[in-house]
Image (spheres, rainbow, N blue to C red):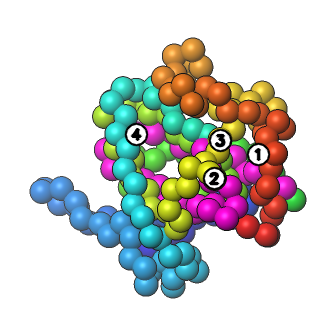
């Protein structure tokens, strides 16, 4: 298991060994003991799965607020996605910064998304299956988001914004500055 730091404070890329031959491949996508040995002691309690049929589907930028905030372990099991995180934790050294990562069925990378980050992705290929573990159940009362096109954050998406396919809900999120932010670095 390889754990890579990123430019965002506390965000990790996880690479599990992949064993391939003429039949395909095998990998352990998650092994609690190995994660704990790497210093990632998170009690994941639910697995989620989304399918996005077309390239250009953007889902984000989502999070749950404290009390029900979620850590996520995200991977693309089919297709290729551009996964984006924004640090929303007031007082963090990377507060308000964003970074994007390619997750795909080919690189087998997983992204560890800590509590206090807005998370979203855009599909780069058809039929993207994205699976992720969370350490807290869904809570409608704590469900939130910030604008995917917040000019103060300046996320650079890999395709023109007018070509993106979003849900109505994802077009209505406030900017980070407009959001009444309860995320405090070190206190989530």
Identify which residue, 17 or 39, lies in the foreground: 39
Q: Is residue 18 left or right of residue 96?
A: left
Residue 121 in view here: yes
Tell me the crowding category of disc 3: few under 14, some 14 to 19, or many 20 or more residues within 10 angstroms, Cα based: many
- Give residue 97's mark: 1
Q: Nearer the viewer, mark 2 or mark 4?
A: 2
Residue 81 falls in image quadrant: top left
Q: Nearer the viewer, mark 3 or mark 2?
A: 2
Q: Which residues, given as a range, are shown in magenta?
A: 62-90
Mark 4 or mark 3, which has the lower sequence index?
A: 4
Residue 110 in view here: no
Dot 3: what SS?
A: strand
State whether residue 126 is above or below residue 77: above
Residue for badge 4: 80
Q: Nearer the viewer, mark 1 or mark 2?
A: 2
Distance of label 3 from label 2 (alpha carbons): 10 Å
Dot 4: what SS?
A: strand
- Give residue 16's mark: none
């Amino acid at each position: 298991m390889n754990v890579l730091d990123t430019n965002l404070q506390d965000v990790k890329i996880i690479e599990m060994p992949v064993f391939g031959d003429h039949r395909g491949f095998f990998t352990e996508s998650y092994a609690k003991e190995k994660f704990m040995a790497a210093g990632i002691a998170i009690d994941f309690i639910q697995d989620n799965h989304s399918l996005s049929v077309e390239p250009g589907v953007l889902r984000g930028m989502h999070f749950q607020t404290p009390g029900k905030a979620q850590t996520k372990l995200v991977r693309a099991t089919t297709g290729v996605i551009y996964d984006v995180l924004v640090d929303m934790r007031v007082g963090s050294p990377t507060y308000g910064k964003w970074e994007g990562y390619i997750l795909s069925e080919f690189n087998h990378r997983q992204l560890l998304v800590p509590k206090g980050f807005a998370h979203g992705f855009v599909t780069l290929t058809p039929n993207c299956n994205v699976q992720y573990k969370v350490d807290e159940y869904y809570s409608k009362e704590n469900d939130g988001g910030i604008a995917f096109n917040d000019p103060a954050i300046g996320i650079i998406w890999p395709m023109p914004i007018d070509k993106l396919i979003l849900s109505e809900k994802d077009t209505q999120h406030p900017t980070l500055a407009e959001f009444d932010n309860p995320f405090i670095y070190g206190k989530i």
